[in-house]
């Protein structure tokens, strides 16, 4: 019975965005987004050159890399857009035509390289470390159930740990355009905020 529960939790667990990388591919640039399970994606280009990819059924810890400046990519952001939807925003130097290729555990975004030769870039283990710690914390209750049998009265009392709240902030804006205000909140919160026209 316990192995069936463990199997179901593994199958039903959301995918996690584990790594981002930017690599040259001839006259093109590829942004590779690795996930630890298959996901559905949606993509769209904003007028200002931001390419947005939503990963349905995925979770991530927010991270932002500004001033990458290679292969036509200014920066990258990844954040939890909504429960069950991780969002990756690729900030391009200009709007470009692009292709999205889905693989079993990765999504590749390819577009013409307007900037010339560049060295590859990767987020390294930053996102993978967050995914591993979340995976270990999700597996810990399963291991406890296998080693200690809870009393029937307590079996239904386990609750999910709540996410810690961030520190309160105070900000003042005076005659600042709304997109700049939203960008500030996006940077502070680690979430993508995209204004609609």
Image (spheres, helix red, strand yellow):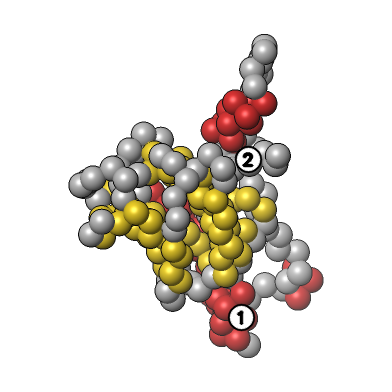
Which residue is painted at 44% across and 58% down in the image? 98
Name which quarter of the figure residue 35 lies in: bottom left
In the depicted view, which residue is nearer to us: 150 or 26?
Answer: 26
Relative vertical location of residue 140 with respect to residue 47 in this rendering, above or below: below
Q: Is residue 48 left or right of residue 69?
A: right
Query: Residue 171, percent across and down?
Result: 65, 18
In the depicted view, which residue is nearer to us: 130 or 161?
Answer: 130
Report crowding for label 2: few under 14, some 14 to 19, many 20 or more residues within 10 A (C-alpha): some
Disc 1 vs disc 2: which is toward the camera?
A: 2
Which residue is painted at 76% across and 75% down in the image? 152
Residue identified by numbered label 1: 8
Disc 1 is placed on an element classified as: helix
Residue identified by numbered label 2: 193
Relative vertical location of residue 35 with respect to residue 80 in this rendering, above or below: below
Labels 1 & 2 near each other (Cβ < 8 A): no
Name which quarter of the figure residue 196 lies in: top right
**Would residue 18 be visible to someone looking at this image?**
no
Query: Residue 162, percent across and down?
Result: 67, 49
Give the quadrant of the C terminus: top right
Query: Residue 190, percent across and down?
Result: 55, 39
């Amino acid at each position: 019975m316990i192995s069936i529960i463990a199997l179901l939790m593994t199958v039903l667990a959301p995918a996690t965005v584990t790594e981002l990388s930017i690599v040259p591919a001839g006259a093109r640039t590829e942004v590779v987004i690795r996930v630890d399970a298959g996901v559905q994606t949606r993509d769209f280009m904003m007028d200002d050159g931001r390419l947005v990819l939503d990963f349905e059924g995925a979770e991530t810890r927010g991270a932002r890399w500004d001033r990458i400046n290679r292969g036509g990519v200014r920066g990258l952001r990844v954040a939890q857009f909504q429960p069950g939807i991780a969002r990756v925003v690729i900030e391009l130097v200009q709007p470009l035509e692009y292709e999205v290729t889905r693989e079993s555990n990765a999504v590749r975004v390819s577009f013409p390289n307007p900037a010339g030769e560049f060295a590859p870039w990767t987020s390294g283990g930053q996102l993978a470390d967050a995914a591993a710690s979340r995976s270990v914390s999700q597996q810990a209750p399963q291991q406890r159930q296998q080693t200690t049998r809870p009393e029937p009265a307590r079996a239904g009392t386990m609750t999910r740990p709540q996410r810690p709240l961030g520190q309160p902030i105070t900000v003042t804006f005076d005659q600042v355009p709304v997109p700049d205000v939203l960008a500030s909140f996006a940077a502070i919160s680690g979430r993508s905020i995209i204004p609609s026209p």
